[in-house]
Amino acid sequence: MTAGARAESRVADAAPANWVDLHAPGAWRPYLRLMRADRPIGTWLLLLPCWQSLGLAAMADAPRLGDLWIFLACGLGAVVMRGAGCVLNDIADRDFDGRVERTKLRPIPSGAVTLRQAALFMGALGLIGLMILLTLNKAAIWLGVLSLIPVAVYPFMKRITWWPQVFLGIAFNWGALLAWAAHAGSLSLAPVLLYLGGIFWTLGYDTIYAHQDKEDDALIGVKSTARLFGAQTRSWMIGFYVAAVLLAGAAGWAAGAGWPFWIGLCAYGAHLVWQIRSLRIDDAAQCLKLFRSNRDAGLLLMAGAWGAAFLA
């Protein structure tokens, strides 16, 4: 495939120099794009609650050798299950995506992948995810099975509620529960608080993301918090991000956090303040930049948890 053809088939919000376009074999590219391998930010946002919670669990108890596999399993699981979720989302949204400028070149609406091929690919990704899940303890396995409910529900919420971002948060932060259970064998207050804080974090960053599509969404009748909040988005963001920081702090307190956690929490909060101050809801490029920056926000909180696990 020529460079011009690669650029023509590249989905609008993928980085121009992403590895899928530059290095992946041509036959693989439609499937890698379907699972968003060319846009890894979603994998990070699914993974970081897992790693944050595992760090909290190690901080509350003690780091264990088995945490190395849990850490790796969360990473592998996030890649394949985020991919499976994206395929499900694209199957559900296939009639919408072709009418939205940012998504019209996705593999299904562009015809690069058929509906049957997409469904088979989703099944294969789900099977790999199941194999990874079965290496963990019973509590984590049951939580992994339960996670399929919000994953299956989310793609349809934008049709019936102005708050689909809530359902995305419920699905994307589930790893905060699962990773703690994989370490501890059960749940406690700390991972629940972290999970709730993650939902508010998702409400903030996905509202930013949704502002890219609000004109197209209005034309085709898709609902979102971006459309609901409009010019009041910054005020809502302040509330969401304050709740995210307070709940993360409460989770750290419940887990007996040491000083590195509080430094990480302050850095996390400062990053969210920067996002609010930088937000320009009518600048799609800036919205995408801020959305992607949440990888760094989540890494700051994770670094604080793991720092406390080993240093405090």
Image (cartoon, rainbow, N blue to C red):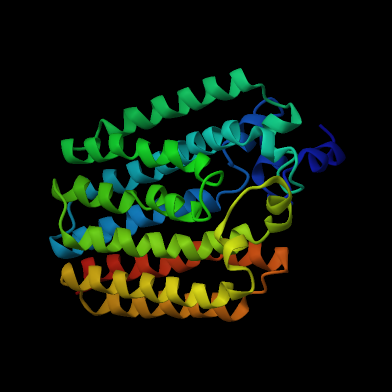
Residue 137: image quadrant is: top left
Quadrant in which the C terminus is drawn = bottom left
Q: Residue at x 24, y 72 (%)?
A: 250
List x then y, in percent, for residue 236: 50, 73
Q: Residue at x 24, y 68 (%)?
A: 251
Image check: 238 left or right of 187?
Answer: right
In the figure, 252 relative to 65: above or below? below
**Total marks in image:** 0
Q: Residue at x 47, y 62 (%)?
A: 203
Q: Is residue 65 visible?
A: no
In the figure, 302 relative to 114: above or below? below
In the figure, 288 relative to 80: above or below? below
List x then y, in percent, for residue 28: 64, 28
Image check: 18 left or right of 47?
Answer: right
List x then y, in percent, for residue 164: 50, 51
Image check: 249 left or right of 230?
Answer: left
In the figure, 302 relative to 172: above or below? below
List x then y, in percent, for residue 226: 60, 62
Q: Is residue 154 visible?
A: yes
> Residue 69 versus residue 270: which sits nearer the camera?
270
Quadrant in which the N terminus is drawn = top right
> Residue 37 versus residue 206: which sits nearer the camera?
206
